[in-house]
Amino acid sequence: MVFGHFKPYILHIEQIIDGIFYNMKALRTLYEQLGVEAYYKQYAAQYINPHLAQIQELLLANEGNLDYSSLLDLCAGGGEVSAIVQSLGYSNTTATDPFTHQLYQKNIGSECQKLSFDDIIRGKLEGNFSTVVCSFAMHLCPTQQLYPLLLQLFALSPVLVIISPHKRPILDVYEGVQCVLEDYSFTKKGKKVFLKAYNYAYIQHQ
Ligand SMILES: C[S@@+](CC[C@H](N)C(=O)[O-])C[C@H]1O[C@@H](n2cnc3c(N)ncnc32)[C@H](O)[C@@H]1O
């Protein structure tokens, strides 16, 4: 009976371990085996980013360079980016993720929209943002959808920030898109996590 009280915590710990396991164990292989959509449908509730420390370091180090006052957390996962900027005192965050919106709501306590890249391309995202941050996710957007996605995002925000453990996606190859800020942080294994901020030459925001 006493053990029963601990059951939810044990289940939670098991989920966390499971989540770390799946993140650390060749996420790419799982993407390939299951497909991105099926992977996130199956494991959305266990999602954990093992590079939270690097995301935090980059967002804190660039607080003076970026405007977090009205931030869109795109592909928000468990609210990693939102939690960090909210800890800095910025409460006006909007989030969207088609798979982990429930996890986001549980972790952050506010609503997460369910929009996919495809939905955003079709104009379903509304708002005016100071900055869009897409952490560990833009590489999941098919290459042929990147430019239409960028155009939609730059219509709503003057700055798009990509945080990523690799150089992909390269966005300044697209007409009018320019990289205006670049930074990186090291993991314990000495690998770089990059932060890149982009703007778009052809839309002037107030
Ligand atoms: C590696 S996680 C990154 C989550 C979080 N931003 C972070 O930094 O930890 C990738 C996220 O992309 C989302 N995602 C996957 N496919 C997507 C799609 N087609 N459109 C929008 N988001 C998608 C997943 O639900 C997942 O939360």
Image (tube, rainbow, N blue to C red):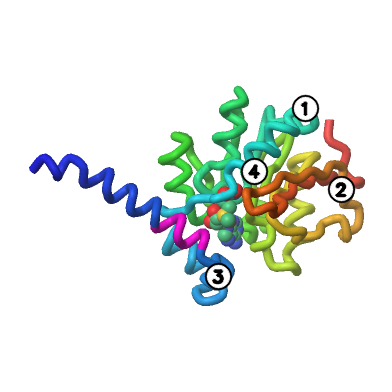
Identify the secondary structure beneath mark 4: helix
Q: Label 2: few (<14), some or many (≥20) within 10 Å?
A: some
Q: Is residue 115 visible?
A: no
Amino acid identity at mark 2: Cys
Q: Earlier in the sequence, mark 1 or mark 3?
A: 3
Q: Are marks 1 and 2 in contact (CB under 8 Å)?
A: no
Q: Label 1: few (<14), some or many (≥20) within 10 Å?
A: few
Q: Earlier in the sequence, mark 2 or mark 3?
A: 3
The residues tagged by marks 2 and 3 sit, at their Cα atoms, a distance apart of 28 Å
- Residue picked out by circle 1: 64
Res. 54 mark? 4
Amino acid identity at mark 3: Tyr
- Residue picked out by circle 2: 179
Amino acid identity at mark 1: Gly
- Residue picked out by circle 3: 31
Q: Which residues are magenta?
A: 18-24
Q: Main secondary structure of the magenta part?
A: helix
Identify the secondary structure beneath mark 2: strand
Q: Earlier in the sequence, mark 3 or mark 4?
A: 3
Furthest toward the front, the residue is 189
The residues tagged by marks 4 and 2 sit, at their Cα atoms, a distance apart of 20 Å
Q: Are marks 1 and 3 in contact (CB under 8 Å)?
A: no
